[in-house]
Image (cartoon, helix red, strand yellow):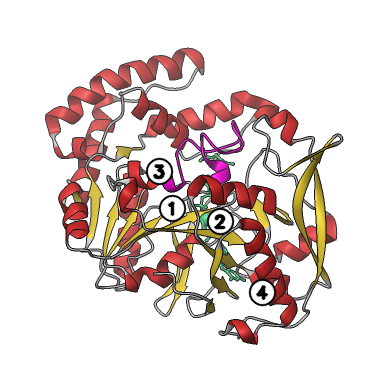
Amino acid sequence: MPVVAVIGAQWGDEGKGRIVDLLASRARLVIRYSGGNNAGHTVINDLGAFKLHLMPSGIFDANTVNVIGHGVVINPEVLIGEIDHLQSKGISTAKLFISDRAHIIMPYHILQDQLQEQSRGDSKIGTTGRGIGPAYADKMDRIGIRAGDLMHEETLLGRLRIVLEEKNRLLTKLYGAQAFSLHDVYLKYLDFGRRLADHITEIHPIVHRALEKDIPILMEGAQGTLLDVDHGTYPYVTSSSPGAAGVCQGSGIAPSHLNSVIGVYKAFVSRVGGGPFPTEVDGAEADALRQIGTPWAEVGTTTGRLRRVGWFDAVLARYAAQINGIDTVAITKLDVLDNLPSIKICVGYKLHDAALDYPPSTIAVLEQVEPIYEELPGWQTPTSDIRDFQALPEEAQAYVARLCQLIGARLGIVSVGPSRDQTVFVSDVF
Ligand code: GDP
Ligand code: IMO
Ligand code: MG
């Protein structure tokens, strides 16, 4: 049985949450493998409308086990809030398991993230301010606190005593901020540990029993390939590995077990925060893509910031497919293009007199590329009630087919609205 990954193939917010919710009933195990509560995954189904930050989007299927893998950094307060909210809506979280190896976002990470951003001035990254970068940095620096540590009073106190001394020195001496009290932080996080005790566990046996028994597994990505710390538009990236390689590291599933990678692409492109964006548009073109006033307006799910928008960039899209081994494409928000008379696709970059078919790795160079556009006719017909690919207007079919041709992978799913049922299945995806 397959292990299928659903990953963001642009700068995040491609609609990963809605695709995972859609496919979760075909899986028995859903694993969120990276990122933290910088993510915001919108799910709209017959149980309601939900914005998930840490909870895997498979939680709405009563038969599915949901796991938060060790590649995730967890703010326990946010996760407890999500558990409480879902339970208040009658959704069971009894089958949620949290890797005891996952790192915990501590209050000093959040403060450090915000102070670092302030001190960067004009060159700030535009982080979500959720402590993501400092939490991953501490993990690599081997001074992180892990979910399992919250279960052991002495370990937690011992770890915190060492780490807080170092953190307080940094925060007070470099930034003039207030020191954190060891006593207060210890008691607060011990309490979070008690609240999450039924969920925190070793996930290795769960994952490997599922593999042995051929149970279908769905891997839920957060962020997107262009925010990847290695492959993205560094330094305007997040601090994790959102792509297919991160699947393995963040869950303990070997690369040889990964059967399929579904790349989720918006029918155009959006980006929150700073950094280069070759196909970015503004004015009336941006208003048409942003659709302010609708529930799916291009406003950040986590921070409420206006998202930057632009035309579909096939150079970046193909790059993402190559890096992740994307074999299947999910195109979301096709309906957003319904009213446009014509639609642009960036099919290449011009750099001075040279043509490029991949993104240059240096930001200063990427900022200089000029997109080469191809223009396709729009369909100017509503698509959100259509459920069959052949019933889509011919121009819409041609647009989507062209995107997949440029990406170099087969089309699996097209979505034409934010609800679970507003989906067109084109080929077998799972
Ligand atoms: P994620 O982070 O990749 O899960 O994506 P987000 O939830 O942050 O952003 C996607 C936004 O687009 C949400 O507001 C979704 O409700 C909305 N959305 C997803 N698919 C569609 C679609 O096919 N059509 C429309 N109109 N909205 C969609
Ligand atoms: P989902 O899972 C869109 C962006 C931030 C910022 C950069 C670094 O909903 O697609 P960080 O707080 O991670 O250090 O910020 O990454 N970013 C996202 N943009 N969607 C996301 O997640 C994002 N997660 C991080 O806006 O530019
Ligand atoms: Mg999002």
- Of the image marks 1 and 2, the number of the one nearer the N terminus: 2
Q: On the image, numbered disc 1 is attached to which residue?
A: 221
What is the crowding at mark 3: few (fewer than 14 residues within 10 Å), some, or many (at least 20)? many
Is 58 included in the stretch rendered in magenta? Answer: no
In percent of width and height, residue 128 lies at 53, 42
Q: Categorize mark 4 by other alpha carbons within 10 Å: few (<14), some (14-19), many (20+).
A: many
Please, what secondary structure does the residue beneath circle 1 have?
Answer: loop
The answer to whether the beta carbon of the residue marked 1 is less than 8 Å from any atom of ligand 2 is yes
N-terminal label among 1 and 4: 1
User: Residue 150: x, y in percent?
Assistant: 20, 38
> Which residue does the image show at 76% across and 48% down from the upper left?
348
Q: Is the distance from the Cβ of mark 4 to the nearest ligand 1 atom less than 8 Å?
A: yes
Do callouts 1 and 4 mark residues in contact (Cβ within 8 Å)? no
Between residues 73 and 293, which one lies in front from this camera angle?
73
Question: What's the magenta region?
Answer: 225-245
- Quadrant of the image for the C terminus? bottom left
Q: Of the residues under marks 4 and 3, which one precedes in the sequence? A: 3
Which quarter of the figure is the N terminus placed in?
Answer: bottom left
Residue pointed to by mark 4: 335
Q: Position of residue 333 (x, y in %)?
A: 62, 68
Upstream in sequence: badge 3 or badge 1: 1
Mark-to-mark CA distance, 4 and 3 = 31 Å
Give the label, 2 or 3, closer to the camera.
Answer: 3
Query: Which residue in the protein does label 3 denote?
Result: 246
